[in-house]
Image (cartoon, rainbow, N blue to C red):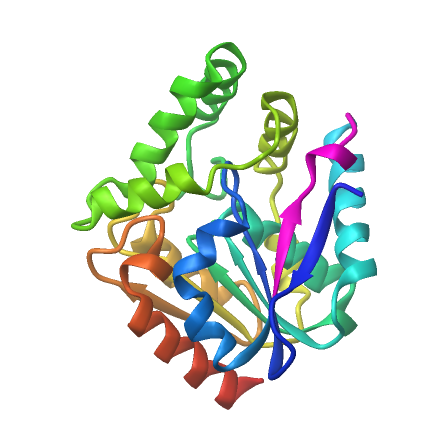
Amino acid sequence: MMLRIECLNDKGRDLVLVPGWGSSAAIFDPLIDKLTAEFRVHRVIFDPSGWCKSSPAALQYTLIQCLRRQAPKRAVWMGWSLGGLLATQLAAQVPEHVKGLITVAFNPCFVQRDDWHCAMPQAQFSRFQTDFSINPEATLKRFQALQVLGAPDKRHLLDLLHRSCSPLSTAYLSDLLTLLLEDVRPALAQLQLPVLHLLGNADALVPASPLAELLPLLSCDASVQCYPGASHLPFISATDKVMKDVLCWEADRC
């Protein structure tokens, strides 16, 4: 299997954590003690030994099926960045597994389209893909620097990103990059469940200001929280505020 879901404790409401591109599930470590006090926490771990080359459509299908087979039913899902895309697709395709969706630093259309300008330009994304295939180490470091740009706790965040690098090879990470070309706005639109979007106002990759206005329009029961001074990792920069907002939302909406 390309991924496995690891359960960290045995009590509480089910919560599944899905990491973003270039990082492992260890990116959530600073949150784990707080989360396990409230939830039965599961985390998604990508497994390099079970990976296989495939088209973007086949890759997404396989990942969603892996999640579906292993996931607890009626869980809250929290997906960070690319993890938000996968959690959204799962919620749309297998709604019986998801009672609530939390996205973190997530853009449902990561690359610009004619009707969606609050995203990365296509040429910039293509250049990033090329750079990563040629010099993956330097490109990943540049990507990590972008994730912490503007954050007051930059050094701490960079250290965390370095310690939680994905175990996948360059080829497999390149495959995952292609998933960011997908537009998941239609998936959000079909959701009949509560959604909470968490954004960092200082995020250099996901523009919080326009998304804070647009995201609630894409699904029938969506809320947005933005965190001042937080970059692409608001759940680390604003841990206490994020926890408070997640618990209040979960108690009220789920």
Q: Residue furthest top?
A: 134
As drawn, 34 above or below 218: below
| Residue at image location 72% in from the left, 32% down from the top | 56
Inspect the magenta stretch and tell me whether residue 51 lies in it.
yes
Kindly indicate the quadrant of the structure image that contains residue 58: top right
Residue 66 point in image, percent of width and height: 79, 51
User: 30 or 250, which is in the foreground?
Assistant: 30
- Left or right, residue 76 beside residue 210: right
Q: Quadrant of the N terminus?
A: top right
Q: Toward which corner of the image does residue 73 lie, by quadrant?
A: bottom right
Q: 216 and 96: which one is in front? A: 96
Q: Position of residue 31 (x, y in %)?
A: 41, 65
Quadrant where the C terminus is found in the figure: bottom right
Residue in the image at 20% along x and 56% along y: 229
Q: Is residue 60 magenta?
A: no
The residue that appears at 77% across and 28% down in the rendered structure is: 55
How far across and down, in percent of the image, does residue 99 sit?
Answer: 66, 77
Q: Quadrant of residue 141?
A: top left
The percent position of residue 95, horizontal first and vertical second, equals 75, 69
Residue stretch rendered in magenta on the structure:
42-53
Q: Residue at x 48, y 18 (%)?
A: 136
Instruction: Evaluate whether residue 204 shows in this view.
Output: no
Q: Is residue 242 left or right of residue 126?
A: left
Q: Which residue is the extreme one toward the bottom?
A: 252
Q: Is residue 186 above or below residue 158?
A: below
Question: What is the tally of numbered marks visible in this picture?
Answer: 0
